[in-house]
Amino acid sequence: MIKLIPVGKAFRLILLSIFIVQGLALGSLLIYKKVKQSWMIDDAFRILAIVQTGPEKEALPTGFLAELLDLSVDRPMNLYRFDCKEARAKLLSCPVIKEATVRRIKPGTVYVDYTIRKPVAYLGDLSNTALDEEGVAFPFSPYYTPKFLPEIFLGGTEELDKSYPCKWGDCIQSDRLQLAWNVLQQLRFRLVDESLRIQRIDVSRSGSSSYGFREIIVVLETRERQQMILRLNSHDYTAALTDYHLMKEYLTQHVQGSPLIVDLRIPNLAFVKEKE
């Protein structure tokens, strides 16, 4: 048999239950805050270590990460005073770091998972500057070991200067850079035998007002360290590279001593001479 409760009494019981639940929640929150405050001054939660992970093992020295995060043995920090969001922002302020996550691990460890930028070319117009596939500029030394990468020259016209990064970490928005990427991709596709290395791509004169000066310069290097300089039509460089591909083996065999200049700016024609 169901026992009915008067509406007034039921209402009072509901209100009492709400007050009890809210009271317990508020009490628990106050206790947690008090406990957390005690943790924030407890030496047991002093940060003593940084653990780093990522696609590359210890891509950056742990000491460098500690410097970015303002962590020092001389100025120990409590784990519960350490702000992970602020720490992530500090890591991303370093131009070589592409992505980063930061977590706290009790009792005294900061966990950092990060990815550094992968250099695919040097920006020859600026010293000690590399580019990743997104066109972001960042310092190469002292973060990476020496490696052979193609140099890209974009030129220094007034229009281009506006797209140059004012600091490392900026992304270069430039039609010339996109043109250089396209040429680089075409070259890598056609140099599958790795008989030649791409040393330089210069698109600084690709948009010259004079058709006689408008060109893309590509400098290649053979296994014997001999140079071959290609002059390409900036509007039809794909066809020029196709012509070069057909005569690549012959040209590679005849590079001796002085660099060989191969002018491919006129379709279906190649003018070959040694550089004076």
Image (spheres, rainbow, N blue to C red):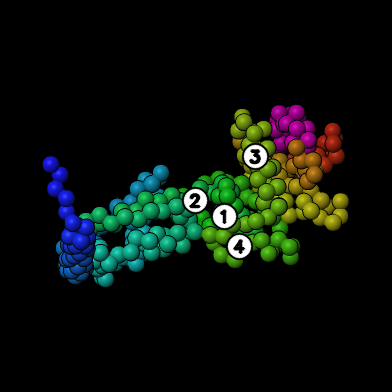
- Sequence order check, earlier mark of 3 and 4: 4
7 lies left or right of 212: left
Considering the image in quadrants, where does the N terminus appear? top left
Residue picked out by circle 3: 185
Which quarter of the picture shows residue 260?
top right
Give, as a three-letter code, the residue at label 4.
Pro
CA gap, disc 4 and disc 2: 16 Å
Disc 4 crowd rating (10 Å Cα; few below 14, some 14-19, many 20+) is: some
Give, as a three-letter code, the residue at label 3.
Gln
Disc 3 crowd rating (10 Å Cα; few below 14, some 14-19, many 20+) is: few
The reply to whether dot 2 and dot 1 touch (C-beta < 8 Å) is yes
Q: Is residue 38 above or below residue 265?
A: below
Q: Residue at x 60, y 33 (%)?
A: 194
SS state under label 2: loop
> How many numbered marks, from 0 up?
4
SS state under label 1: loop
Residue picked out by circle 4: 165
Residue picked out by circle 1: 136
Expressed as whole percent of the image width and height from the top left, the position of residue 152 reads 65, 51
- Sequence order check, earlier mark of 2 and 3: 2
CA gap, disc 3 and disc 4: 23 Å
Q: Residue at x 67, y 51 (%)?
A: 177
Q: Which residues are magenta?
A: 239-257
- Sequence order check, earlier mark of 4 and 2: 2
- Sequence order check, earlier mark of 2 and 1: 2
Asked if the magenta segment contains residue 260, the reply would be no
Residue picked out by circle 2: 117
- Sequence order check, earlier mark of 4 and 1: 1
Q: Is residue 163 visible?
A: yes
**Nearer the observer, 194 or 97:** 97
